[in-house]
Each structure stands twice: as C-alpha cells, then as structure tokens.
Amino acid sequence: MKFTLSWLKEHLDTDADVAVVADAMTMAGLEVEDVHDPIAALAPFTVARIVSAEQHPNADRLRVCQVDTVDGPKEIVCGAPNARAGLTTIYAPIGAFVPGLGVTLVEKPVRGVVSHGMLCSASELELAGESDGILELADDLAVGTPAAGVFGAEPVIDFEVTPNRPDWLGVAGIARDLAAAGLGQLKTPPILPVPGTFPSPITVRIEAPEMCPVFAGRLIRGVKNGPSPEWLQRRLTAIGLRSISRLVDVTNLIAYDRCRPAHVYDAAKLVGTEIVVRGGHLAESTTAVHLKLRDDTPFDKGDGPHREHLIALDGKTYAVDPTMCVIADAGGERPIGLGGVMGGESTGCSDETVDVFVECAWFDPIVTAQTGRTLALNSDAQYRFARGVDPASVAAGVELATRMILDLCGGEPSELVVTGQTPAAPAAFAFDPARVASLTGLSLDDDRIAEILSRLGFEVARGTPWTVTPPSWRRDVEGTADLVEEVARIEGYGALPSTPLPDLGAPSRGVLNPRQARVRLARRALAAMGYAEAVTWSFTKQSTAALFGGGDDALRVENPIAADLDCMRPSALPNLIQAAARNAARGHADAALFEIGPIYLDDSPTGQRTVIAGLVAPRAARHWGAAPEDALFGLKGDLMALLEALGAPVASLQLAQGQNRDWWHPGRSARLQLGPKNVMVEFGALHPRVLKALDADGPMLAFEIVLDAVPEPRGAKSKARGPANLANLMPLTRDFAFVVEDGKAVGDLVRAVAGADKALVAGVSVFDVYRGAGVPEGMKSVALEVSIQPVEATLTEAEIEALSAKVVAAAQKLGATLRS
Amino acid sequence: MTDLAQLELDLINAIGSAETAAAVEDLRVAALGKSGSISGLLKGMGALSPDERREQGPMINGLRDRVSSALAARKAELEGAELDARLKAEHVDLTLPSRPRRSGSVHPTMQVMDEMIALFAEMGFAVAEGPDIEDDFHNFTALNFPPKHPAREMHDTFFLRPDPETGERKVLRTHTSPVQVRTMMTQKPPIRIIAPGRTFRKDSDATHTPMFHQVEGLVIDRDIHMGHLKWTLETFVARFFEVDGVDARFRPHHFPFTEPSAEMDIRCDRSGGELKLNQGDSWMEILGCGMVHPNVLRNCGINPDEFQGFAFGMGVDRLAMLKYGIPDLRPMFDADTRWLAHYGFSAFAAPNSASGLS
C-alpha cells in the first residue's frame, strides 16, 4: 500500500516529516518497506527554455538546441521530436544522475557535436512510465525553477499491510492508528449524505446474499466526464496509479482513501432498469433462457459445462462459474461485472457518459479471494474485498462518491437505493483490563487502556468487567488477546519489561533424547573422519527416486519449485551422488560427503526416517609412497567405527552379502543386520548403472544407516562402567594358514576361529589372503594371527597345542584345512 | 722384569690406532684376557715378596685400569662413528609430502543449530521434533489460520498430490509450528521446548530457498508474559552473537497463531558486507514471536484461561549467514566441497559453555 505524505495530512493534523511518520508506522505495526523521496532524486533538475533548435549536421533525428538554463546558455543535442524553439522544459546538467536512465551524464560528443547537458522526458525523471518526447511545461515558469516544485513531487511511503488489517488499505485507516499512537490529531472529513432529487430509475435485486449481502447505488444524471483535474491526477500517479477519467478516478481515489471500492456504470449502456447480483451460470441449467440471448453474451463452446463469459474492463475475457459473484443486467441475463473484482467492458464509462450509476456493495472475502485466484485476476477492489472491507461503509461510500462526482462532473443525483442487509457488526465482549498486565507485563492504568481503545474506534463500557465493542472495520478483533495487542501496540513495545524466565536450574542431564544425541555424535564423528557434511534437498526427481526404491505418487509434490525436484526422497544417496558429480564437473572429483537427514517412505507422520548417509568418490591424487588402503575397506572401517561410536550392537551384527537392493553393486556391497528383517545399514560400491543414470562417474562408495533401526544401548541405568578386568599375564600369538574354497567368506572363518575357545582367544586378525602357486585351483589360503590371552596361569606348551587343535577343528567345520 | 711404562705406551698406542670394534676387542683379549699381558703381570704378583708387591701392585693395577678405560673409550668412540655412518645412510627427504588426508567439516547450518540448542538448553528448553510431511490441521488449522484466508497463501505452501480416495492434500510443513501443536497435544504444561528442523516454501532467490531450517520455541505456563519473551530472546540473541548485550527492538506484527505478535529487530551496520551489531542506524528483522493465540491453545487442548505463554521462530540458515558472513543462501544446499571446506566447522568445535559456541 502506497500513499503520499500530503494525502495522509488530509486525515491527520501533524507536523511530522516523512521519516517520523515512517518510524511511527513501523512501531505501530505498519511495516514500512520503502520511503521514496523523489525530491532528492529531482534535485539536479531545473526548468530551461529552448532558444533555438537546428538540425544536427550528421543525424536526421537529432537537433542541436541552444538552451537558456540555470547555468547560462548551453548547447545541447536532443533526439526528441518535440524539441523546438520556445519550448519550456527540464534541463539536466553534466554530472546529474538521470533516474529513469540509470546513468550519470558526462560531456561527450553526439555524432560529432558535444552536448553540454540533457533535456528530459517525464519517464527519464521517473514521473511517468513512458513518454514520447521531452517535457512540455507552462511558458510562465522561470528558467532555473527546481523541478521538484514544478511537479509537486513529494515523498511516497510504501508499507506491508498484514492480512488482518484491511482498514490500512485506506489512508484514513492509517491516519487513525497514527493518531492513536500520538502522532497527531485525526481530522478525516465526515461524509455527509447528498439528498437525491428523484427516485432512482435503476433498481437492484440480490439473488446471492451469501456472496453479496448488501448493495447500494444511485443514478447521477447529466454528468460531464473527461480528464481529471491536475490535483487528482497527481494524487493517483504519485502512488503508481493511472489517471483514466474523472468518474473512474473518483472510484480509485475512494478505494485508496477509505478502503472503500466503488464502481461506476454508464447507465445508457445498461440493458433494462434492474441490476441483478447472482452466482455465475453454467449454460446447461439455463439453456432455454440463453438461446434467446443476444450475440454478445458468449458461452464457450469447448468440452464440459458451458460457462458464461465476461469481457472485463481490462479487455480480457473471463469464464465465470457458480462460485463467483456476477453482476448482471437485462433481467439478470447479461453479466456486466464480477462482483468485488472487476466491472465489465460493456457498461464502462467513457468521456461520452452522461448518466452514471454509482455502486458500493459488500462482497464476501472468501468468495472474492477465490475468484481472484481462480481467474488470476487481481484488482485494487479484489485485494480489498478479499481481506475484508468495512461492511458499514456501503451507503457512505456512495455518498462520498456522489459528492465528488457532483464536484468534478456536475449532474443531478437520484435517491439512494440500498438493497439487502448489512452484515452484523462485530459483537461486544467482556474484557478485563488486568489482562493487559498479565499478558504483556506492561503496567498501564485503566484510563490509558480505555483511551487507546477509544482512539482506535472501540466502544468501551467500563463496568466489571468492561464491555468492549469493536468498530465495524475491525472484524479481526474477537477477544481479549486482540485488545491486549491493540493496547500494547499503541503504547509501544518499547515499554515492555524484560523479565527473566523462571529459573528451572541447569538441566540435570542433557536436554537431547538418545536419538538426538546420536545424530549430534555421528555428525562430529564423521567430520573427524574426514567427511564433509552436506545438507541437500528433501526432494529429488521422481525418476531418480524410482531408482532408489521410491517415487510413489503419494510422495509426489504437486506444485514443485522445479521439475527435477518433484518427489520426496527415499534415500539421501541420490543427492550425495549428484553433489559428488557436480564437484567432479568443477574439477574436484575426490570427495567424501555425508548428510544426516530425513528420508520419506510414505506420507504419514511415521513414514519419515533419519538416515546417516556417507559417500566417498575415491579419486585421490597419485602419491609417491606405498599403495594406499583399499577405499572400500577404508569406508567399511569408517562405518564400523561410527557404529561403535553410536553404541550400536556391533558384536552381534550380521554382515549379509549379495542381498542389497538394486542401487548397490551386487558383488561389492553388503548389509549389516540383526536379522533379515532388521537391516540397519547398506554399504559398499554403488551400481554403475545407477551412477550412469545420474550422470555420475564411478566408482562411488557409500553407506546409509537408518538410525531409527539402530537399537539404543540397553539398560544404561547407571553411568558406572563396571570393572575393567585387565589381564596381568602376557598375551601370545599363533599364526595359522588355512586353505579354503575361494567362494567361502573369510568373515565366517574368522568368526569360527574366534569362537574356538571364547575364554582364551582374544582376537583374530587376517594378515594374508593368497591365491596362486602352491594353493589348488579354486581355493585360497587365508593366514590368521590368533591372539591368546591366558587368564589364570601362563599356558603350558601342551595347553597351547590343545588350543591350536581346537582352532583347526573349528576351521575344519567350514571346510578349511590347515595349509601344510 | 717387564718395562711397565713401555708396555703401557705400546698398548695405548695400539688402542688409539685400532680402526674397528673387533680390533679393540682383540687388543682387550691380548692385554686383559686370560693369557693377556696385563693379566700375566697380575698373576705374577703372587710370586713377589711383600715389599715388591707393595711397590709393584699399585703400578700394575693402575696400568690395568688405564688400559681398561682406554679400551672402553675407544670402543664407544668407534661405535658412535658407526651409528653416525648408519644414520647418515638412513637420510630421507622430509620435504616430500605426506599422504593427503581429507579434512571433514560440519555444515554451518548444523553448527548453528547445535549452538542454538546449547544456548536454549541452558535456559531449560528441551528439543522436540516432528514430521516434515504434515496435514492441513497441524500446519494451518490448529494454528488459527482461517480456512481459505489470505495468510495461507502467504506461506507459498508445497502440496503433495491429493490422496486418490480421500482427496486430502498433505503439505510440506511451512514452519516447525506443527511440532508445537503436537507437543501441546501430548504434553501438559509447563512446556519449554524448541523445535528445530527442515521447513519448505515455494520460493527461490538469493535470500529464499525452497527448503530451509527453522528453530521455533514454545513456553507455556501459568504466568508467562511478553516480558519473559523479550528477556528470553534478548538473552539468546546476545549469547548467540557472542556479545555482552544486544540493541534490539520489538515491533508489532501479525501472525495468525500469536496475539499479541511481534518481530524482533537488531541494530546493526551491514556496510562492507560484515555484520556489526549494536552499530549504525539500520534495524534488521531477525525473528517473529508473540503470545500464543488463545485459539491455538484451545485447538491443542489447553485451557487459555489457565495457561498462557509465548512462541518464537527464526531462520537458522539466515542466522548462520549473518553470524558467519556467508553472502548467499543458495550454495548452502549445493554441497560444493570447496564451499563446505571454507564455511564448514571443525568436528571438535562442538558448542559448549567453556570454550564458546564455535
């Protein structure tokens, strides 16, 4: 909402300058977005007079003008067709910043003739949207007169109107709040009824009171339309509106002055003498009637129900439906307007209009909002009705419009016609003024509270408790909290006390639940392991989601921000893969990324999981030293260390290979589970086909932990650790080499050997896996180092022999034989 | 009679010119071994008269001690030289690079979330969470958004496809307020929580992304008023920006779910791209807040005549940008490894009250 300072001062008696007004607005809740002060921008520009204008020697369309300026005579090159001797216009000196062009003038030759300044058009000064020549000003203006004074330029304030306060869509409403806040005295002129001299020949019938409960109007005979006077044009153009004609400008002025939309019909173009307010028609239900209609009541001929059409004042054709409010004439047959939104072209006013029917009505906010949305049709009226216009302003609106039309266009008014029922005014309710203190901490006496409410238009009856009646324009106020806000807002939030929260003491333990604490720990652990944390979209492309087991319709975004972000992700991996690919495309192929975030299995509150996903694109630069660790086992090591840190039951996890889902490399991936139905991690190399589909170069290695599937450590009732039981006997090691079928998993062999004597075997490590000479075809040799920890006494040679035999026997059960 | 002086001279010369540890050992055996020259002299002392022994004894013993020392000294000298030679041969070029190690990092948004959680934890706030995919009730209706009200449009809501049977359209939550609703519906006051999480609005430019992060707070008790709200947020903002105090102002605003409602601005100077708090003439909005609307309390099963409280909400990514001088929001979610390395945080910078927030 934009308005000028002078406009405000017609409603508010104040000496405040624009900065003070803007500040007071902000602190009263009218959030100022911009204060445009054209006076500053116009400062370099002054009135000048062209003494002579000669043809430019080298360019047909240019003239070389001798100009009488504030800086003395200047030679200026001008391309405007209206540059001529004797013209009074605006001069910009070298060095001036021309706002409409966005340039600062420098002295330079134009086709060989140096121009010592510039003659300006209205658009170059941002006084108009476009112009077809330099300004033509009155000849009596003295050379050197500042441009700001010539154009009556003044500061414009633009502010954000919150949806609860439609009354701020009128300057009078703004003034009321500023007066209450102490900025000045409210002086909005009262609206006096204009007596009619004859009964209105045009009547109104409301068929859709749920859309339009009340409709008022009157005929004014014998008006003279035409361009508006300069003050009115200036008032409208200053806030970015277009001046059209006196009759139309009056309605626009009232909309912005009082938040009271109005409409004018050219009475001569009305068919019949009755205006009907109704819902839009579908042709099927009214075929018989419409067959008789004239050609200018078009119905669409497409499929589906045939709808009425209206050509609106913007020249566009709109199809209406029964949810929209239609204004019709011709006995209710011909649509001539969309109620609360826009009038129709067929009855629009022109310079030839002699008799005008002036309308003010009240249209339902939800109906108006929906119509605007459905038709993508926004207007000042639609914006106001959708938020809620004062229902009590219907008749007053017609009276104000009448007064202005009579003043500007002359004419003779009929009596006022008011049809329907004004919606009920907001109800009175009980209010305890002590709630101001208990809700805000402000201590104000009752008189002050009553004063603020009264200044805002509330009726206050101070009984026990008080009874407060909101004004008709404050339909947002429903109860105590709303009144407390009004009081606190006008008193100023600066007066609020700063009161410490009741001290609950430092929490006896952390505030995070175990799952939240694990997320935090995983984040720091992975960062310490060299992974960079990424945060990526919760959405992905549907076809990508499908590659990772998702993409259901139930998880499709109906209105995505972009076509490739149209589905909730079933995994964090596709985003990490694409991120790594983007990094590679930028020349940084080596990456280790992780993300801890949501995945979506269905659209219910329980369908969301938290995953810890890591991705490695191993592209380390070549190094002079020995070969590095295999990246896949590096990733496995990171994963196992992370699970250990999270307190996952690592010792009882099964590693199952060959069962991962489609996006994993079938031979180079595995899952960790407590059982086939309790899979908590998949990890390994990603499937090359999936990488290719995502335009990513492999190999890429990854893991994805479903945190919700990782059980929390049990029975941690006490933080005490229990005894450490450190053995005080020397451990010893024995090496074994087993020959086993190549297809057998080494992990199984290790597990069997570790279980050969759970009391004595402290650990098993694999120090060689060998295939080749000396080992039969199809077999491999696996070399194990078994750590033995004596518990009670040093082991004798015989006891060690016996343990070795157990190890060999355990291995044999898996078909492994001791290599001889 | 052996000439002891000559013998000593010979032996010391020989030891001095021995070139290897083995040659030193040979000399030791020749002098001090079983049948060594000095050993022979010591043995021969038994045959001497007491007077001769008294005279010769100290001389022979002295000779033995000096030769022993010379042998030991020479041996140590030669061993030292050998070690030096070996170590010299073991030289490596330490200007060669070590194997590069990836340096991990914590995302600034997550660092800032951890900071906020740490600060609010000290004020007794627990952390509540809820789903990203919400229904209309929890995201709007319970929060006092009237049906079809323009305020709903201002949220630029993402919708999921309507359920083919019920026609219900789930929404991606536009704020974490549904978590407040869920908390109030399942817990009895007093309530003191923050709700951090992902939020979604259909908007994309330099300062808006279709996904972003919020931390909201909720305090419900019998006597909580706007003064508590003001203190809580002033305290938080000062501690978050790690300054002693913050020049803040509260400004009336409108939210459907709070009444009275406010926005909090902080005084700052942002010329030159860096945020200087408590300086300059401009005010920057940093969060929205207010007293929980009685309708919201009622919708969540809390009696507004008995309980009241405040709520607030702020953008985590934006506060991360402000605090750490990140100029553009969009790269936050692009996972550019260079950006993450530059703006990310050490794993060990976990916020705490001893070493600070980061």
Image: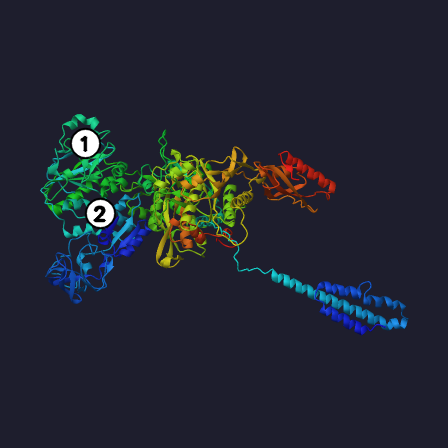
Work out whether residue A286 or residue A179 is closer to the camera in this orientation and state it. A286
Residue at the disc numbered 2: A257
Image coordinates for residue B227, horizontal then vertical, percent: 42, 49
Q: Secondary structure at mark 2?
A: helix
To the question of a shared chain for discs 1 and 2, the answer is: yes
> Can I make out residue B195 in this image?
no
In the rendered view, does B258 fall on the left or right side of A662? left
Reading the image, the residue beneath label 1 is: A299
Most extreme residue toward the top is A288
Q: Amino acid at mark 2?
A: Asp
Dot 1: chain letter: A
Kindly tell me whether residue A119 is visible in this rendering. Answer: yes
Residue A449 or A187: which is nearer the viewer? A187
Q: Which mark is residue A514?
A: none
Q: Depth check: B79 or A111 in front? A: B79
Quadrant of residue A307 within the rendered picture: top left
Residue A511, percent from left and from top: 51, 45
The kind of residue tagged 1 is: Phe
Label 1, secondary structure: give it: loop
